[in-house]
């Protein structure tokens, strides 16, 4: 699996935007970029995913570099509830069977200051 | 309604015992997984089942035996528990052909003394 690199931790203030970077310089042309987060004492939670174009959903936005070697998860207005570990994960496209597990790295520990 | 549920939430047991963790999903998914999160917080896939058939078994000791009685359930049985088995175990599910999103349960914290 191609590797991802994320900062160990980031800090932001409540109600401000947060930009969480992820480097994936060895990404293959067909890998999707997924983001999950894990709130304290909870299971991981899907956030967003994309392939080439920027993506928006109710939780966040995903900005993907033109060369796809990096991406940024954007939380538009962080709240205390967004304090979590955020994981950037590369996944090959569905190829039949579709039962592959997620390969989690260390993620970024996001701290939100009130 | 809880989408992916696990029981028990906490499990404390002694070395050498045999224990089971149960997982159920009510999402209509065809694929279920077990992950282990160790004390350093690394999350690692252990098993995946698609339509009750084992797909992934990631170098897990054969003391761990998953069992899928139907597509909505994937239980994890652990024989001869060791101290190193202490971890949080997460069950997850997904639909293999519709979406890549995996939905995780709340976890079972296993402590082996």
Image (cartoon, coloured by chain):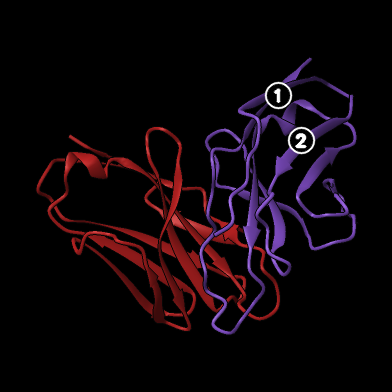
Chain colours: A purple, B red
Please give the name of the residue rendered at 52% of the width and 61% of the height, measured from the top-left corner.
B92
Image: A90 above or below B94? above
Q: Is residue B24 left or right of residue A17?
A: left
Q: Is residue A94 left or right of residue B92?
A: right
Image: A106 above or below B30? above
| Circle 2 Cα neighbour tier, 10 Å, few/some/many (<14 / 14–19 / ≥20) | many
Residue B76: image location, x then y, percent = 32, 62
- Residue A10 tag number: 1
Q: Is residue B83 left or right of residue A79?
A: left
Please give the name of the residue rendered at 59% of the width and 56% of the height, measured from the top-left corner.
A2
Q: Is residue B67 left or right of residue B95?
A: left
- Chain holding disc 1: A
What residue sits right under mark 2 in the picture?
A20
Dots 2, 1 in contact, CB < 8 A:
yes
Is residue B45 visible in the rendered image? The answer is yes
Residue A112: image location, x then y, percent = 74, 21
Q: How many marks?
A: 2
Which quadrant, please, contains the C terminus of chain A? top right
Residue B96: image location, x then y, percent = 60, 77
- Secondary element at tag 1: strand
| Circle 1 Cα neighbour tier, 10 Å, few/some/many (<14 / 14–19 / ≥20) | some
Which quadrant, please, contains the N terminus of chain A? bottom right
> Which one is nearer the viewer's eye here, B60 or A81?
B60
């Amino acid at each position: 699996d191609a590797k991802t690199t994320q900062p160990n931790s980031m800090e932001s203030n409540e109600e401000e935007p947060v930009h969480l970077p992820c480097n994936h310089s060895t990404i293959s042309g067909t890998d999707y970029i997924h983001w999950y987060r894990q709130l304290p004492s909870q299971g991981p939670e899907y956030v967003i995913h994309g392939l080439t174009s920027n993506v928006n959903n109710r939780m966040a936005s995903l900005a993907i570099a033109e060369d796809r070697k990096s991406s940024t998860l954007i939380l538009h207005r962080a709240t205390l509830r967004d304090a979590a570990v955020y994981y950037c994960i590369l996944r090959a496209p569905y190829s039949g069977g579709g039962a592959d597990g997620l390969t989690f790295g260390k993620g970024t520990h996001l701290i939100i200051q009130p | 309604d809880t989408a992916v549920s696990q029981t028990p939430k906490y499990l404390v047991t002694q070395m050498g015992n045999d224990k089971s963790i149960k997982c159920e999903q009510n999402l209509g998914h065809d694929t279920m997984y077990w992950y282990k999160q160790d004390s350093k917080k690394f999350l690692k896939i252990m098993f995946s089942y698609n339509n009750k058939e084992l797909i992934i078994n990631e170098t897990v000791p054969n003391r761990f035996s998953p069992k899928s009685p139907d597509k909505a359930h994937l239980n994890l049985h652990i024989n001869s528990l060791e101290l190193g088995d202490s971890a949080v175990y997460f069950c997850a599910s997904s639909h293999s052909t519709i979406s890549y999103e995996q939905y995780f349960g709340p976890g079972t914290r296993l402590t082996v003394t």
